[in-house]
Image: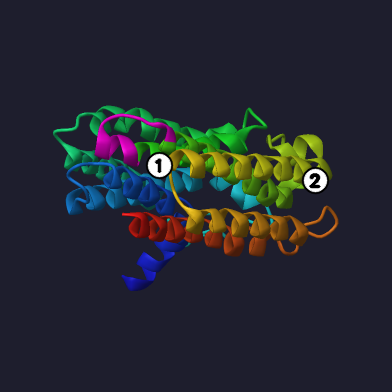
Amino acid sequence: MYKKLLQFLELIRFSHTLFAIPFALFSAVLAWDGKEAGFNWRELLGIILCMVFARTAAMGFNRVVDYKIDAKNPRTEGRHIPAGLISIRMVSLFVIISSAGFILSTLIFLPNPWPIRLSVPFLLFLLGYSYSKRFTSLCHYWLSTALMLSPLGSWIAIRGELAWPPVLLGVVIFFWVGGFDIIYACQDEEYDREKGLFSIPSRWGISKALKIAFVSHLLMIIALVGFWYVSGLGYIFLLGVVVVSLLLLYEHKLVRPDDLTRVNIAFFNINSLVSIGLFLLGLIDTLVGA
């Protein structure tokens, strides 16, 4: 049973929740900070459950939809479904349970009606990403749009409205995730082109794709400065902006058109530092300024 649970966690890359949950929590911290009632344990539980269930459903669905593609790709043929470690039926059931868990978790925020109203459209958009590589080279930015909904959703769940801080934080995520997903997709550039799959590397080549990713991350930094200014955070978070800029510069130095061997280091290690670091520095800045 324990081994099967580990296989499911590996299947959905549960560790990659580090890319999304910190931003959802960061948005929640800012929402609570400006709210008369302040912090709420029930809302925190709701945000965590919604994030985990939504991402689990989306990743499981992606593995089901892409299992034939994964089976033919040397890089992904060892994934759990192609390798026969977990059946499609089990993963499909896992997706249904996770989807239901996400929708039910939005009820935690009642009497605020917006989370439950937006739950199904939100979930459909997340699941729709799995098909995007079949018809658009902008699939990377479909993924980033899905992830940028996390700070927007947290703010709406707590405040019942939108404001500039979560919107700009969402823009930060949009360009950040889009950029590093382009870098990650460079590994499959040749395979995607051969199979008629769409991505920026398969359409424009690895060299141009890395340049597009660099511009995307440059726009992320600009949006991050704008977020810092609008949110009223102090110099602690501004220091984080500088550190993140240096980390992203290092990420682009790690990956070159003729050397993709360090893509996984750039993808997971550095980007985990970005998400967790911004959250922690934002939390500290908020507490210090309180």
Which residue is located at x 44 percent, y 31 percent? 125
Of residues 114 and 159, the one drawn nearer to the viewer in this rendering: 159
- Looking at the image, residue 263 sits to the left or right of residue 108; the answer is right
Q: Cα distance, mark 1 to mark 2? A: 31 Å
Q: Which mark is residue 151?
A: 1
- Looking at the image, residue 155 sits to the left or right of residue 178; the answer is left
Q: Position of residue 36 (x, y in %)?
A: 19, 42
- What quarter of the picture does the N terminus occupy? bottom left
- Residue 163 visible? The answer is yes
Residue 8 drawn above or below residue 211: below
The residue indicated by pointer 2 is 206
Of residues 182 and 248, the one drawn nearer to the viewer in this rendering: 248
Q: Which residues are magenta?
A: 154-164
> In which image quadrant can residue 250 be found?
bottom right
> In which image quadrant can residue 54 be found?
top left
Is residue 189 within the magenta segment?
Answer: no
Of residues 201 and 110, the one drawn nearer to the viewer in this rendering: 110
Which amino acid, by three-letter code, is at mark 1?
Answer: Pro
Of residues 290 and 73, the one drawn nearer to the viewer in this rendering: 290
Which residue is located at x 43 percent, y 44 percent? 232
